[in-house]
Image: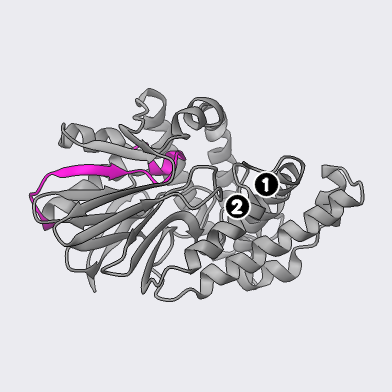
Amino acid sequence: MILFLCVLAKASFAAGFTLHQLADGIYATERTEPAGLMFDANNVFIINEADVIVVDSNISPDSSKEVLAALRKLTNKPVRYVINTHWHEDHILGNSVWRDAYPGVEFIGHVQTHDDLTTTGASNRKSLLESGADGVASLREAIRSKVGLAGTPLTEEERISHESDIFLVERYLKEAGALPIIEPDIALDSELVLQRGQRRIDIRFLGAAHTRSDLVVWLPNEKILIAGDLLVWPIPLVGSTSYPAAYAETLKKLSALPATSIVPGHGPVFHDDHYLRQMIVLLDGLTAQVKAAKARGETLEQAAKSVDLSALRQPFVGDSILLKIIFNMYVKSSGIAAAYQEAAAPVK
């Protein structure tokens, strides 16, 4: 059931989300931005008898304020917990909004969150703050010249995507530098169960995947799975912080849950496991090719050329130039590098 659309207009682009009711008291926000190189996260509201649990915040306080406003149209119950499925900034930078609105709120995350935020997270933030303006300038030039990032005539799909990326990056640059990073008050390494009346909320770590510290939320009574960035549509975010071989095994564990609704970190709510299994095929294929290249004694640079993902790419990309660009960045380039590193030093 779709309840309403929340949008914020800036220039020629509108960012926002559609709110879906998945079960009694359970709602998912589905971001309405097009696929692109910059992302904002889906959220979930779990409204209980006396309180609310929120899954994930957003890429900026402004974005989380919009999500907060949507929640307050549904209930005046206090938010007791915010679960951050992982430490990437598009899932945590809005945490301060929830703490300001509900001073008693506690944040739940993985035990590895602190180390990841203060090392890789800090480095990634510094890089984006320093390079973001140049990235925006490149996208504006692509729109002005009508020549896309692949050097081909700019498609309408690319233009719309670039406008979205510009909006999200500029929003990030405006706010991110001065934001406090709010770390978990409650950290788990395997499983935490919250019981709210008859509702069981099972927070689990199933293994390294998109990062080494991804959490999923399983609601067994409602058969709703909140997957975070273990699932991202239309292009999986394998990325530089991933462990592709472990990722595939973690998704296989995920597929054993009898979910009838699956909320991804980005993209539409799924009602079957077809896309999940498609991702497993991709990750298994990527890992097998990289391991074979390493066994032949190839360097990373050589493996990047010899590994051929074209057949595995096609179900995700089709004929879209834009999706090919995203795939090459977040699966081919960073994914091959991550798989090569994992083959040398498997995650523990």
Q: How is the image coloured?
A: one colour
**Among the 4 quarters of the image, the one containing residue 319:** bottom right
Contact? badges 1 and 2 (CB < 8 Å)? yes
Q: Can residue 70 be seen in this snapshot? A: no
State which quarter of the image contains the C terminus: top right
Q: Is residue 121 magenta?
A: no
Q: Secondary structure at mark 1?
A: helix
Residue 4, given in percent of the width and then of the height, sits at: 21, 65
Residue visible at 54% across and 26% down?
Answer: 119
Q: Is residue 134 above or below residue 203?
A: above
Disc 2 packing (10 Å; few <14; some 14–19; many ≥20)? many
Label 1 or label 2, whichever comes before in sequence order: 2
Residue visible at 42% across and 49% down?
Answer: 215
- Tell me which amino acid carries mark 1: Ser
Q: Is residue 31 left or right of residue 343?
A: left
- Tell me which amino acid carries mark 2: Val
Q: Is residue 54 above or below residue 110?
A: below
Residue 288, given in percent of the width and then of the height, sits at: 76, 60
Residue topped by disc 1: 334
Q: Can residue 327 be seen in this snapshot? A: yes
Residue topped by disc 2: 238
Cα gap from disc 1 to disc 2, whole angstroms? 7 Å
* Magenta-drawn segment: 74-93
Front residue of 133/258: it is 258
Residue 296, given in percent of the width and then of the height, sits at: 92, 51
Q: Is residue 76 magenta?
A: yes
